[in-house]
């Protein structure tokens, strides 16, 4: 059973990463804060949830993902949520002092916004969370091959979208 100071420690250790994951999924800062609060409120109400969990990070990502899916379902169809996510995207990368770096971050954020949410979530888990495809498939409750193909399709879309930027950077 988690005691309040254990929950505070867990929040201090995990909240920032969960926030980034949820923001990349929801593309909305207010929804992200609400979902993060929902995850930790659930843990506070049901401290036994963490008992016997081998990988707390993966467990928290699953809770966060499930909360995000529930939010989308509560709001209506996935298509409406995806359309809104593409148009109302929040900044997902910290601002950069270097204008070239900021331009790259803006281009990457715009490219990510065009990737379907199911693929974007897999990219985030793979690149920013460092999870394996096996861990991603377990967390999202999808087949291993589906996780890998969503990642590959997303990378192909990102390559196509970012190719002009790459060509501009690499021109002599």
Image (tube, rainbow, N blue to C red):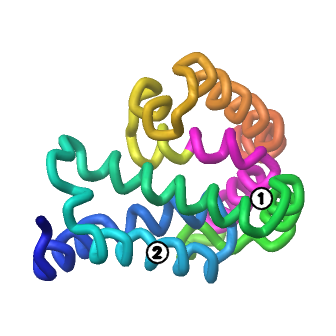
Secondary structure beneath label 2 = helix
Which numbered tag is attached to residue 38? 2
In the displayed structure, would residue 141 be above or below residue 64?
Answer: above
- Left or right of 46: which side holds 140? right
Which numbered tag is attached to residue 88? none
- Left or right of 101: which side holds 38? left
Name the magenta segment's main secondary structure: helix
Does label 2 or label 1 sit earlier along the sequence? 2
Residue 150 location, x and y as percent? 67, 29
Write down the region rendered in magenta: 101-123
- Left or right of 98: which side holds 119? right
Secondary structure beneath label 1 = helix
Which numbered tag is attached to residue 110? 1
Residue 126 location, x and y as percent? 48, 38
Residue 172 in view: no
- Left or right of 59: which side holds 20? right
Quadrant where the image shows the N terminus = bottom left
Q: Quadrant of residue 68?
A: bottom right
Q: Residue at x 57, y 39 (%)?
A: 122
Residue 80 location, x and y as percent? 88, 61
Would you say residue 103 sits in the magenta stretch? Answer: yes
In the displayed structure, would residue 52 be above or below residue 103?
Answer: above
Residue 135 location, x and y as percent? 39, 32
Q: Residue at x 45, y 48 (%)?
A: 128
């Amino acid at each position: 059973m988690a005691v309040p100071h254990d929950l505070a420690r867990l929040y201090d250790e995990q909240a920032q990463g969960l926030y980034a994951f949820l923001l990349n999924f929801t593309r909305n800062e207010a929804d992200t804060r609400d979902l993060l609060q929902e995850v930790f409120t659930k843990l506070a109400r049901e401290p036994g949830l963490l008992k016997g969990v081998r990988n707390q990070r993966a467990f928290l990502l699953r809770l966060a993902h499930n909360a995000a899916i529930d939010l989308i379902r509560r709001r209506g169809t996935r298509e409406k949520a995806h359309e809104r996510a593409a148009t109302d995207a929040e900044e997902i990368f910290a601002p950069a002092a270097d204008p070239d770096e900021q331009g790259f971050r803006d281009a990457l954020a715009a490219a990510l916004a065009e990737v379907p949410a199911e693929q974007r979530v897999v990219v985030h888990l793979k690149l920013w969370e460092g999870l394996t495809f096996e861990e991603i498939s377990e967390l999202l409750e999808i087949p291993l091959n589906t996780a890998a193909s969503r990642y590959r399709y997303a990378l192909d879309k990102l390559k196509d979208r970012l190719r002009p930027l790459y060509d501009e950077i690499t021109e002599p």
